[in-house]
Image (cartoon, rainbow, N blue to C red):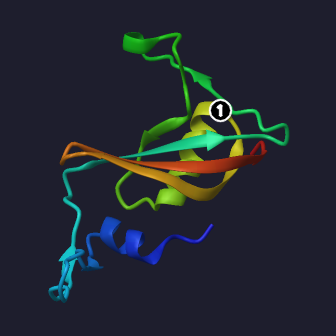
Amino acid sequence: MAEIPELAAVLGGGAWPVAESYDGDPPPAVPARLRGNVCYVVLAVLYNERDEVLLVQEAKAECRGKWYLPAGRMEPGEGIAAAVRREVREETGLECEPLTLLALEERGTAWMRFVFLARPTGRP
């Protein structure tokens, strides 16, 4: 899956022009830039040929036994699609293909979560 150029630029510390909506003429575009101290998280909605969604059982003490979608933090310098593939592989043992970005969630400057629709492509 190809990275989205604007998203890749921002995650790499760059910027791209973002124009806001106004009733009159829009003001000149201003660059949008993400902060380096934000925690970036990826999450995969992984489905198979029967349209079943894969859940994993959490092992961390504070939420042991609860069921979640495969997710985790991006590593420094890692692309979004690569982070989805890595997290799915680490948590499920499966390789996957990210198909599309479903949602982008944020909690101020604390974290941003990229939710992808993905399909398994087999085991490594």
* Residue 110: quadrant of the picture: top left
Q: Residues within 10 Å of mark 1 (few under 14, many from 20)?
A: some
Q: Who's the residue at 84% across and 37% down the image?
A: 50
Residue 75 screen position, x and y as percent: 39, 50
Image side of residue 70 versus residue 73, left or right:
right
87 relative to 9, above or below: above
Q: Nearer the viewer, residue 123 or 62?
A: 62
Residue 2 screen position, x and y as percent: 58, 71
Image side of residue 99 versus residue 52, left or right:
left
48 relative to 103, above or below: above
Residue labelled with disc 1:
92
Q: Who's the residue at 68% across and 35% down the image?
A: 93
Q: Who's the residue at 48% across and 72% down the image?
A: 4
Residue 122 screen position, x and y as percent: 80, 45
* Residue 11: quadrant of the picture: bottom left
Q: Nearer the viewer, residue 32 or 91?
A: 32
Callout 1: SS = helix
Task: Tell me which amino acid carries mark 1.
Answer: Thr
Q: Residue furthest left?
A: 27
Q: Quadrant of the C terminus?
A: top right
Q: Quadrant of the N terminus?
A: bottom right
Residue 20 screen position, x and y as percent: 22, 75
Q: Who's the residue at 19% across and 51% down the image?
A: 37
